[in-house]
């Protein structure tokens, strides 16, 4: 993989670009329009960093505080995905192992099963069914004891300490080396007739999960549903209350679980049963003893698909899993942590030849307000990926299309089909970084981050959508 890191040309460009920016002091018509877009009322009182360069030559088209480090929000995922794709390659697959003290006996029985996480963030109910089916094909018919779950490859710090109070919302799902369904469950609320009790269902339905639902159906109004997660010693319970009008379609909500490894183990038990394999015991934490036999090394989705989910749908927990996996790949002392992952990410970006002055990495998703980066660093990352025959197409394909899909599906309609860009949003923070094609067919690479605006997130996002529209003109 050493060749993926070698980028002497990028190092030269990183040193050359500040001088080029100085030569662009006399703005072009596009530069004047972009400057006006950043001066709109929606960005009043804000700090920004912005850079636009020609995709082919790297020559700057527009620059404004291009080296100013700001909070990037989910634009951080551009850096995480770029470093992961460069380090592992787009075809890399994380492996989940199933071990036992021996092979199944003549009747297909084992005393216990051990499920060891390898950092795969793409396991789902469906892929665990495939894993269980492969165990059936290997001769397993019953487990006489428990399923042990081992996620010791990563530490047990599930949420970064700088995230503050985390909720049960799916975007706050806990990171672990063994997890499934992105650490979340689905709750569907279906109205009945007015005055009746709405039906609330969990998916998946597991003995580990309890549901306490009291949602009434009303004759009008808007859905008002509250979901609270209660964690006990051996259960996670969802308390669902509120109301839903009879006239609306069923509403779907996603909520995270506090114990990702246990959840994955419970899902495996369910899928083993679906394949005719009985499990007499429960799910317990525990590592396989030395000398255990590997029954199955299950490979997950290729990294190209993982990166696409991280970028296109801004999946936070997958980004954090990639961050900690970078630490594992760099040989950091186990278990991998946010800190060791952040250090590995910084080293990876430096090896790629990116300008990292002012860069500060706290996490991989951008949920932390301790992250800092500049438009110049983000543009350099995009250009480095773009020049990579190995992984450039995968990163580009992962970026949301303006007005078409991902987190830009309902945004930047005026740039529809002409902008591919990663979004970013925290309260008081927004950003957009990616590629644009103007009406003359010229391709541009751009990044703009804005912090501390006074008029609310919606107005600020609209302003950046206007910035994107100007790029596409």
Image (tube, rainbow, N blue to C red):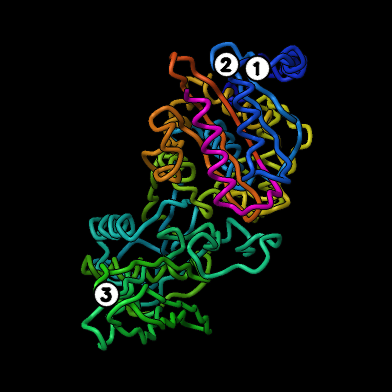
Give whichever of discs 2 and 1 has the lower sequence position: 2
Task: Give the CA distance from mark 2 to mark 1.
Answer: 6 Å
Q: Which residues are magenta?
A: 450-473
At horizontal 41% and vertical 66% (from top left) the residue drawn is 254
Characterize the local packing of mark 2: few (<14), some (14-19) or many (20 or more) Cα atoms within 10 angstroms.
Answer: some
Helix, strand or loop status at disc 1: strand
Which residue bears the numbered disc 3? 190
The answer, for residue 417, to whether it is visible in the render is yes
Q: Which quadrant of the structure image shows residue 352? A: top right
Q: Are marks 2 and 1 in contact (CB under 8 Å)?
A: yes
Measured as percent of width and height from the top left, residue 84 is found at: 55, 37
Helix, strand or loop status at disc 2: strand
Helix, strand or loop for the magenta stretch, by majority: helix
- Check residue 344 in the rendering and tell me which mark sits there, or answer none: none
Give whichever of discs 2 and 3 has the lower sequence position: 2
Please state which of residues 327 and 286 is positioned toward the viewer in this rendering.
327
Give whichever of discs 3 and 1 has the lower sequence position: 1
Residue 5 to residue 211: above or below: above
Please state which of residues 123 and 280 is positioned toward the viewer in this rendering.
123
Image quadrant for the N terminus?
Answer: top right
Which residue bears the numbered disc 2? 54
Residue 277 to residue 15: above or below: below
- Check residue 60 in the rendering and tell me which mark sits there, or answer none: 1
Please state which of residues 401 and 89 is positioned toward the viewer in this rendering.
401
Task: Give the CA distance from mark 3 to mark 1.
Answer: 53 Å
Q: Which quadrant of the structure image shows residue 130? A: bottom left
* Side of 181 where 24 appears, left or right: right
């Amino acid at each position: 993989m050493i060749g993926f890191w070698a980028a002497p040309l990028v190092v030269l460009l990183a040193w050359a670009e500040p001088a080029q920016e100085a030569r662009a002091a006399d703005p072009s018509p596009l530069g004047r329009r972009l400057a006006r877009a950043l001066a709109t009322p929606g960005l009043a009182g804000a700090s920004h960093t912005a850079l636009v360069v020609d995709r082919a030559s790297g020559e700057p088209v527009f620059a404004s505080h291009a080296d100013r480090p700001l909070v990037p929000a989910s634009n951080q995922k551009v850096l995480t995905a770029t470093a992961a794709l460069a380090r592992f390659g787009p075809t890399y697959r994380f492996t989940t192992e199933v071990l036992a003290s021996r092979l199944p006996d003549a009747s297909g029985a084992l005393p216990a099963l051990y499920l060891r996480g390898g950092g795969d963030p793409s396991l789902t109910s469906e892929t665990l069914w495939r894993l269980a089916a492969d165990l059936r094909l290997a001769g397993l018919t019953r487990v006489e004891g428990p399923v042990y779950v081992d996620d010791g490859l990563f530490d047990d710090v599930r949420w970064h300490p700088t995230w503050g109070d985390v909720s049960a919302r799916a975007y706050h799902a806990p990171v672990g080396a063994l997890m499934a369904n992105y650490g979340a469950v689905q709750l569907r609320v279906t109205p009945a007739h007015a005055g009746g009790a709405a039906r609330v269902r969990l998916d998946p339905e597991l003995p580990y999960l309890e549901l306490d639902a009291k949602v009434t159906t009303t004759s009008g109004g808007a859905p008002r549903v509250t979901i609270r997660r209660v964690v006990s010693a051996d259960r996670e319970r969802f308390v669902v209350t509120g109301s839903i009008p009879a006239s609306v379609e069923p509403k779907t909500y996603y909520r995270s679980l506090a114990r990702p490894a246990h959840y994955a183990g419970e899902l495996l038990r369910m899928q083993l049963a679906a394949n005719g394999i009985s499990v007499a015991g429960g799910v317990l934490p525990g590592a396989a003893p030395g000398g255990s036999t590997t029954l199955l090394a299950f490979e997950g989705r290729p990294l190209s698909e993982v990166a696409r989910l991280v970028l296109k749908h801004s999946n936070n927990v997958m980004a954090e899993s990639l961050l900690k996996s970078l630490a594992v790949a760099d040989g950091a002392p186990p278990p991998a942590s946010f800190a060791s992952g952040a250090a590995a990410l910084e080293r990876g970006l430096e090896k790629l030849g990116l300008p990292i002055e002012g860069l500060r990495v706290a996490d991989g998703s951008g949920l932390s307000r301790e992250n800092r980066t500049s438009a110049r660093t983000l543009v350099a990352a995009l250009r480095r990926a773009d020049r990579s025959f190995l992984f450039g197409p995968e990163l580009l394909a992962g970026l949301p299309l303006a007005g078409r899909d991902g987190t830009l599906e309902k945004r930047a309609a005026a740039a529809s089909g002409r902008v591919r860009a990663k979004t970013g949003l925290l309260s008081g923070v927004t950003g957009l970084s990616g590629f644009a094609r103007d009406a003359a067919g010229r391709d541009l690479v751009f990044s703009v981050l804005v912090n501390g605006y006074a008029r609310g997130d919606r107005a600020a996002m609209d302003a950046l959508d206007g910035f994107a529209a100007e790029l596409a003109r």
